[in-house]
Amino acid sequence: MSNPDFDALRHAVEAKKELFSIFDRIKLENAKGESNHLHTRRVLTNNNIVPETTKQPAQDIEIEFQKLDPDLQKLEKLIGSAQSDTFISILQKYSWRIGDPANTDPSTASFCDTFRIQKALENAVENSGYLLVKGDLSGIQNYIYGGIQPKNAGGQAKLSKKLRGRSALVAMLTDFLANAMLHELGFPNWHLLFAGGGHFNLILPFSEKLEAQIEDLEDKIAVEMRRAFGDTLDLVVAAVRCDLTILENAGSFFEKLNAKRETKKYQQHPKSLNSHFYPKDELSITERNLLKKQRDKLTEDLGTVLPKRKLLVETVSSQKLHPEKKRAFEVFDFHLEKAVHQLFLASDERISDWNIEDEWENVENFLMLNKEDLKSARVLRMNDTQIFPDDVEWGSQLNIPVSFGFRFLGKYVPPHRTEDRPKTFEELAFPDPSEGEKELTEEQLKKSGLLMLASMRLDVDDLGCIFSHGFGKNVSLSHVVALSREMHYFFTAYFDHLAEENGIYVVYAGGDDAFVVGRWDKIIAFAAQLRDDFQKFVHKNEDVHFSAGIFMGDPKYPVERFFRDAGRLEKEAKFPKNQVNVFSRNLPWHSFKSKIEFGTELFEALKKPDVKAKRKLTMAFMYRVLQLVKTSFHERSGEDENGYKVKRGYVDIPRFGRNIANMRYLFARHGYTNDEIADITKGIEHKLTTDFLTTFNFGSNSKDAQTKVARTKDFLVAFNYALYCLRFHKKLNQ
């Protein structure tokens, strides 16, 4: 039997309408004219979101598209609402890189976005308009990192599990609450425009009755949020009325919505305040402490189970389902007006070696044992778009709507090499024998002087401005949805994929920001690759970028301080933006990459000096060069230079000249001559002489010369990186 939605998707795939990057449309102060970056047609996976990074050849992409019909055939066998819920995931998977055939102009909004909006708007009552709704989780950072005392050092296993559990719970909660609200209000999932990064957007047919229902539902959710999370997390819901002009002028409506959201965020609903200060069931101190321990145990267990699992299960039931009926892990439950909404992982922590087939079987058994109470269920594949089980008879006896889909989460943690568990924060700093590094004994680890952890926090610069002004005066709703989805894909699915490739511990990633922990050199390499891939992702649009702060410390340094110190450096990197702060130095990303490459070459030269060569770089020599750079700038503001007051950090011209002479003397002592400089064309000597000495010039007060001198300090990053690598290498081989 033909289905109009299925036919529309099949037609879009066969039409092969070209799709151009949404980032071509974004124009702020730095954009350089029009650019047409054509997307390659491909099926969505977590590792092919960034162009030029996928290894999937074109013929394999066509083979993947041929799986559309078998997936649609599986879809037709589903019961009731499960068809439309599952179709939304199939729509994204197959048409995220295909333009809308109905659009005669070059398309920058994919078919999956335009079709979803069309379905959401088609059920409105004539002339009544729509209600644009935003749900925003408030207190995310306080919830994830609050209560982590400085005495809790980074090496404690329970702490890493708790952090991982809290951050994952927040990531899963956004979609869960959006779906629960839609079910309670009686709308299908077509009305969910976007969910991720701690907020979601709905568009619903307007009615005054609906406005009252949303307000009542917000109160019920607030009660459940307080029961589940205490006073740390809140859901703020705001809504504004709109009409069909939102299709071509969405910006003004979203501005009103965000303004209303901000007002509500700082003005709690009177009912919420009343229930907060005058709760019906006042708990004793003992009961409150017990409840807190239960919450901590939940997040710790979740942090243990989540890295090993591939399936999530959302259930809607007439009464609470109990996981003890089958080995399932309950994440949370919300008791609302029409139903009980719960989220489960496929199995509990006692199961460690299950594969995906075992998880499918476990989910089926769990649902079968609870089918009398079930109204519907949704099974979600985490970070994988292969949403259907291989068993064609799976769930055939359930006789309830069971839908399938995928959900992208930033959740990767490096596994321990020999034990069935994730690494602790402290173990992240250890050498990795799987990468050819020497394994240190416990005694050697205690004596090792440069086993360091690093944390990185990053945030997309001016994302709110990009949404509100980046598309010009009139931004279409499809472009807002497309941009939200694209950013979500990068900072969840692709971010998690890249973290796994680099052995990085993802504490939190979603929306437009992230917090990761890893060994200091791996974090630096990850930061450089992430920025390169983000540039490919946005097609080098100079108006779309992020800033980051990288903080390094002892593996036992409290992780709460890692978070705060990396955040402090991230804020420093935003003045100006599009920078990274590392080794206590702000520098542009392009300079960061070149200095790390330079530092790597320095390290190789220091690690393996050529004993036959006349010239040899030594560690002492590098420290001398480092000191010369550091002492070439004014240390205090107000110092006098030729009758002028100078600012701290400006070049000290006389000292600069002396240091240049001293530096040339150092090079001469190590075998360099002026004639040799002209003949050098490659290797580390070329970098030191032509690149470094050319930049480290003096004698001119022009703006260009001052800029060059200021950028000379960036070489401190290269020198520090080389010295840290050398110390780490020596510790591994002592």
Image: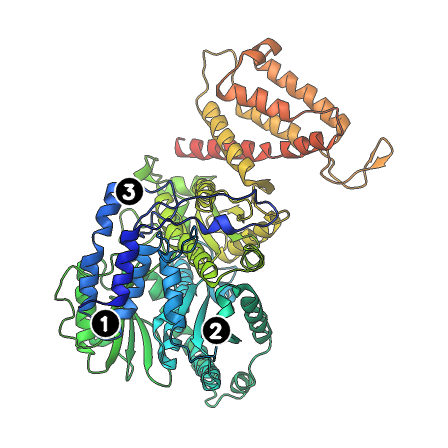
Q: What element does badge 1 sit on? A: strand
Mark toward the start of the polypeptide (1 vs 2):
2
Quadrant of the image occupied by residue 671: top right
Residue at the limit of the structure toward the right, as seen here: 643
Q: Quadrant of the N terminus?
A: bottom left
Q: Residue type at mark 1?
A: Val
Where residue 161 is drawn, which disc sits there?
none
Q: Residue lying farthest bottom?
A: 280
Q: Earlier in the sequence, mark 3 or mark 2?
A: 3
Using the image, determine if residue 138 lies above or below residue 468. Answer: below
What label does residue 56 carry, if any?
Answer: 3
Within 10 Å of disc 1 (Cα), the crowding (few <14, some 14-19, many 20+) is many
Residue named by callout 1:
402
In this view, the mark in front (1 or 2): 2
Q: Is residue 713 above or below residue 302?
A: above
Q: Percent x, y for residue 690?
A: 58, 20
Image mark for residue 133? 2
Please give the name of the residue rendered at 56% of the width and 54% of the height, measured from the top-left corner: 470
